[in-house]
Amino acid sequence: MVLIIAIAVVLSLLSNEASHVLGDIGTATSYDPPYIPTRCYGNRGDQFPPGNLFVAVSVGLWDNGAACGRRYRLRCLSGNDKPCKEGSVIDVKVVDYCPKSPCPSTILLSNDAFSAVSRSSTARINVEYIQYIRVFEFYLLLTVLVNCINCFLIYILIY
């Protein structure tokens, strides 16, 4: 019985990842091709995620290039003439720094990404964007694993 409980605890910890959520509100506009070269990945063709749901970010999110590859969950909140599509939430990947100076918005969405959340291709919209950072707490898993091994050894010694 102790062994079964120990295995259940280990499996639950292995399948459980903690996620910290960092969210904010900003503005978004669309930007047109050509999309390459990008500041993150140059001319690599494999840099764009499926569905071409990618973004370029302004200086506030760029973080000296650390933003490259970050993924955000984004949804349209509001804008002029009600541009937001109902219930549209998309996951986007940062591939570039804003190519315009000054940047017209917090986030520039590819045309495909923008059309997924907005009815108007020329609107400036207010968006909520949330970055998910997955954190695997190795030290906690290791501690539980050691305790489970101890429980297993005790179980063997008793029976």
Image (cartoon, rainbow, N blue to C red):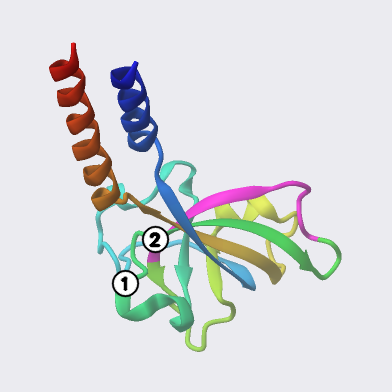
Residue 114, above or below 101: above
**Label 1: which residue?**
66
Residue 28, above or below 46: below
Identify the image quadrant of residue 82. bottom right
Answer few, some or many: residues within 10 Å of disc 2's Cα (few below 14, many 20 plus, some between 14 and 19). some
Identify the image quadrant of residue 141. top left
Residue 104, above or below 159: below
Of the 4 image quadrants, the one containing the C terminus is top left
**Label 2: which residue?**
70
Contact? badges 2 and 1 (CB < 8 Å):
yes
Q: Element at badge 2?
A: loop
Residue 119: % across, % down: 75, 54
The residue located at (45%, 68%) in the rendering is: 56
The residue located at (45%, 53%) in the rendering is: 19
Q: Magenta segment, which residues?
A: 83-95
Q: Does the magenta segment cover residue 84? A: yes
Q: Does the magenta segment cover residue 113? A: no
